Image (cartoon, rainbow, N blue to C red):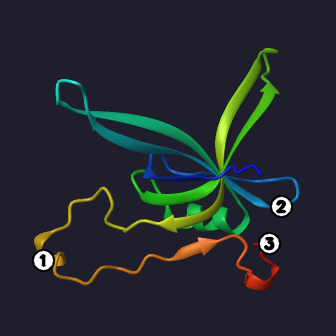
Amino acid sequence: MNLNKVFVLGNLTADPISRALPSGQSVVNFGLATNRIFYNKDRQKQQQAEFHNIVAFGRIAEIAQQYLKKGSMVLIEGRIQTRSWQDSSGNKRTRTEIITERLQLGPRTAGKVIPAEEKGTPPEEIPIIEENEEEIDVKNLPF
């Protein structure tokens, strides 16, 4: 059995770019930065950023376009896919992307300074958006 599953929690590096496929389906692309904090052998704190190319289709793309902007925090669940093409100069190009299967919006205050008077307000509920919301019947599980 094989598994291609990825979870990334990070901040958008730019506003999402939206377009439509010839079929009319919405597609959105955006960059996501994740940070790793660790200590080196001299016990000094280090930070390393990774940048990911994210692609979302259909209703998830519409939600991303509507609610996400540069700096927004988001949790992406999806799969890794690498595609290849030839550019206009004839050079072979490749790009590794995370195809979104599920998206969870972060707090609206991600990346912003919260004024002191707003800190006492209750936290906002964060919606979970899934592409396929079907019930799983435990009788159909193979174990």
Mark 3: secondary structure? loop
Q: Is residue 137 visible?
A: no
Task: In the rendered structure, find residue 24 and report the number of the disc placed on it.
Answer: 2
Q: Amino acid at mark 2?
A: Gly
- The residue at 30%/79% (across/down) is 123
> Is 31 on the left or on the right of 87, as rendered?
left
Mark 1: secondary structure? helix
Residue 109, image x, y percentages: 31, 65
> Is 62 on the left or on the right of 106, as rendered?
right
> Residue beneath label 1, please?
117
Task: In the rendered structure, find residue 130 and report the number of the disc placed on it.
Answer: none
Distance between mark 1 and mark 2 Cα atoms: 45 Å
Q: Earlier in the sequence, mark 1 or mark 2?
A: 2
Q: Residues within 10 Å of mark 2 (few under 14, many from 20)?
A: few
Q: Residues within 10 Å of mark 3 (few under 14, many from 20)?
A: few
Q: Is residue 30 visible?
A: yes
Residue 26, image x, y percentages: 74, 60
